[in-house]
Structures are given as structure tokens and as C-alpha cells.
Image (cartoon, rainbow, N blue to C red):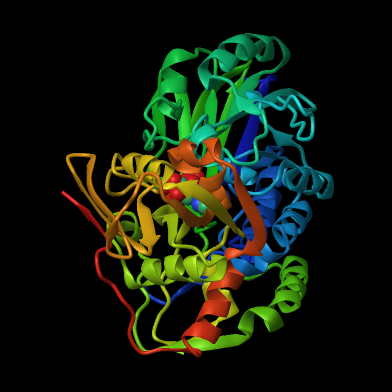
Amino acid sequence: VILSFAAKLTILHINDTHGRAWRFDDPNNQKIGGFAAIATIIEQVRKEVESQGGYVIFLHAGDFNTGVPESDLLDAAPDIVAFNLMKLDALVLGNHEFNKPKQQLARQMKLANFPFLSANFVDPEEIVKPEPYIIKEFPDLKVAIFGLTTEDTLVLQPIHLNGATFLSAVETSKKLVPQLREKADVVIALAHLGIVPGRYPDATTSIKLAEEVDGIDVIIDGHSHTKMEEAMVVNSTIIVQAWEWGKVVGRLDLEIEDGKIVSWSWKAIPVTSDVEEHFYVKTVLGYFKALGSEKLDTVIGETKIVLDGERANVRSKSTNLANLIADAMAWRANADVAIMNGGGIRASIKPGKISIRDVLTVLPFRNTLYVFQMKGEGLLKILEYACTVKPGQGAWPQVSGLTFKSVGGKLVEAKVKGQPIDPEKTYIVATNNYLALGGDGYVVFKQLTGYDTGLALDNVVIEYIQNVLNGIIEDYDSSQRYVYE
Ligand code: ATP
Ligand code: ZN
């Protein structure tokens, strides 16, 4: 039998790389990941598939920004240049693409040789203009790829949106997919949605998308950092995700006959240290790394103890590191009180020398220090909201100059420097720009008028360690400033 309309398509995919452009250590101190090794895998698969007459598409399912100081300092230029060299076909906007102002994202889009997709994103300011979809045309196969970004972004990264919004991923797809089916043999959703519901259960998951929208052949997913052993199939849609940080490359092989997938297989290729690094990609990334490393290696102090920034801890209790950061904010702003979100603290610092890299790993968002002058009444409203936050959420409050207590989600006690908060008295309150602009549900801040000092939080913490702690941390207050019952 001659299958004149049979075609082979291989989709390679990564997601949630978060600045992991260079090889890094896994928990067993084995080197893994890195775009130079991924480039080798991509090149090998391309050769293999193309020599057999098949086609290859390479996709990124979002969240390439934020997580490694060398990348963050250069606004992820190293990552984008590596993707260019790897001939990435498309990337979908992830929520972390909105960590910095939209102008910054627009610059990233200019540097990229590949399109940024998102069909459900709308920016009335027209600063960020992603394509809703692209059609890849091969000699006997047309492939539609459309982008979807999690509606979670509205609550996770609200501060730079300035009126931009995310429409329902389901409704957007219901309109778009029938049109794409007319134009292409295969329809792929490149989705930064996530397989499991996040903290915001209303946001569309990939599973819900597959259940509610007919006609999507494949969902290449991201956002939930899911390590999959095998692909899922929901309502005849194949759903795959490639874990996180480029630890694996997903490989989906499809055989298509007359616009139908007749057979397929998926696997996650581990990016281990025995994968040889691609020479050009490695050279270019090495150059970028050297650019930043002199600054990042600078030692700013030393700690004798572990400074605890573990995700589960800073989102459920006071820790020495959270207290230190809040104290640094209050000190630099000359404030009575400082409040920040535990979710803004992203790593611990091990005993030993502290470098600028360590501080930027703890505080990767380049948050600025905000100062408010407010009545005790306003401060109480902020704390009342903070008491509704459940342990484990990024919004969990970390404070300085203040002790407070909640019972069953209600504020029952709040003292500034040992004195109950006076609703009529004026207090100086420091926070970061994320909370000041209403992030993590702190809308009370947004309703008040504050002042952005423009000082980067990471620099504030560095100054505090150098000037107040004299560069050496023997011990630090880890008392519970907020008691949750
Ligand atoms: P993913 O990488 O899958 O998108 P995520 O990192 O966004 O996940 P979490 O790890 O739960 O999800 O982090 C979300 C929390 O991070 C928010 O609740 C908030 O506390 C904090 N956060 C996010 N963006 C910022 C920011 N720009 N400044 C300060 N804190 C932030
Ligand atoms: Zn992510």
C-alpha cells in the first residue's frame, strides 16, 4: 500500500526554563540541563527525523524568565540568543514573562528570531503584541500552533499589566480552533496553563481545555512543572509537559494520514551530563556568563548559619532570612514597619561567604522599596487582609517592627514596637513594589498613596548586611513575629 498522504512530525518541547541557560547541579550534585546540551539533543533528533523524511518542530511552553542571576541581570538575553541558535519555532508567553515592565518584554520579542504566541492575551496599550497562532507549512503537511497563557497571571504578576488582560483560555480556543482546523492538518495548543489546578482554581488547566474544546490534537503544556512519566490523553487530545528547568526535553512523534494522527509516542529525554554540549551555543552562553560573573562573585559578607528561605517555610512562618529582609527594608526606609510577601523570597543562603549571586538568587524579581505614610487604620486593614492568607501561599506576610496574631483568619492582636496599633496615629510602612501595586491580593496598599524609592531590594539587603551587620552573621532573630492559629 502506498500511503501518499502519510507524514511524520516530531515535536520537541521544553517549558519553565527560568533562566537555566547553563548546566546546574541536581540535588545529588550531578550536572544536568543547560541549553548547550539541549541544543545537541535537538540537532541529533532533527538529523535523525529529517533523514527519514519527517519534520521537526521545537517549542517552548513559557516561563523562560526569572530564576538565575546571570540570566536575570541581562533580562534573559542569553536565553533568547540560545533559542535563536537552536532555531526555536515558537514560544508562548508564560506568567513570568510579566515580571518586568511590558517594554522589557517587547525588547525580548525583538531580539528573538521566533514568534511569541498568545491568543488570549490583550494589551490595549499595544506594547506587547504576540501572534495568536502560526501555521508551519511543510511540503505535504500544515501544522497550526496557537498560544494560551494562564489566567493566573492576573493574580500572580499583576503589577506591570497596566490594563493588559488574559481572556478565558477555553472561550478563546472555542472560537479559534475551528478556524485553525480549516487551515491545517494538525492543531497544537502551546499552553502555559498547567496540568494540575494551581492556587487559583478558576484558571484553565490543560485538562479542562482538552475536556471543553474539541479539535485540539496536542497540548504542549507548561506552568505546573509536572514531571510526566507518560503522555495523558483527554477527550482524544494528547497532553504533554517537560517538567522544568530544561531537565528533560519532551519528544512527541506523530504519524499523520489524511489529517489524522494514526500513531504516536512520547518520551522525556533526560538532559544529563553525558550529553555533549553544542559548541556554538556553549561558547555564546559562556561569554554571557563571564559578563556577569565578576559582579555576581563579589563577596558581600559571611554567614555562620543557614539563612532559611525554603519555599514552604517562608510561606508559613517567620524565618531568620525573612526577618532579616524585612528588617533591612524597615532600616533603609527609616520605617516603623515593613511588610513583604513570603513568596518574594526564593532561596536559602548556606553557611559561608555570601556573594551578590546568593542575594539575587534569594530576591530575583528586582523589586523596589516602597514607602507609605499611613494611619494606623490603614495598617490594620492591611494586616486584616494578611490574616486571611493561608499557610503555603506566596502572599504570606513577613514583617519587621511589628508583631501580630490571627485566630481563624481574623486579626486579634497587632503591636508596633510593643504598643497596640493606634488607628489615628501615623506610621511609616515599607514594602516592595509588588505589594504596593496590589500584588498577592494586597489591594489596600494600592488604594493608598505610596512612594517608590527606586532602591532595588537586593541592594537594600546587601547594604544592610554590610553596614548594619558589619558583614558577618553569627546568628539572626528567627522569632515568630506573626502567630497564626
Ligand atoms: P510558575 O513558575 O509555575 O509560574 P510561580 O513561581 O509563579 O510558578 P509560585 O512559586 O507559587 O508560582 O510563586 C508565586 C508567588 O511569587 C506570588 O504569590 C508572589 O508571592 C511571588 N511573586 C511573583 N512575582 C513576584 C514579583 N514580581 N515580586 C515579588 N514577588 C513575586
Ligand atoms: Zn514557571
Q: Quadrant of the N terminus?
A: top right
* Quarter of the view holding residue 43: bottom right
Please state which of residues 164 and 131 is positioned toward the viewer in this rendering.
164
Answer with left or right where residue 236 lies relative to residue 113.
Answer: left
Could you say where residue 133 lies in the image, as x and y percent from the top left? 71, 25
* Quarter of the view holding residue 207: top left
Please state which of residues 284 and 442 is positioned toward the viewer in this rendering.
442
Could you say where residue 131 lies in the image, as x and y percent from the top left? 75, 28
Asked if residue 381 shows in the view, the reply is yes
State the count of labels.
Answer: 0
Please report the residue visible at 65 percent of the width from the left and 35 percent of the height from the top.
161
Q: In this view, does 347 lie above or below 66?
A: below
Please report the residue visible at 37 percent of the width from the left and 35 percent of the height from the top.
196
Q: Is residue 466 above or below residue 243?
A: below
Answer with left or right where residue 172 lies relative to residue 289.
Answer: left
Please state which of residues 23 and 172 is positioned toward the viewer in this rendering.
172
Q: In this view, does 256 lie above or below 301?
A: above
Please report the residue visible at 63 percent of the width from the left and 45 percent of the height from the top.
97
Could you say where residue 9 lies in the image, as x and y percent from the top left? 64, 34
Asked if residue 225 shows in the view, the reply is no
Could you say where residue 255 lies in the image, as x and y percent from the top left? 58, 29
Q: Residue furthest front?
A: 424
Please report the residue visible at 45 percent of the width from the left and 25 percent of the height from the top.
204
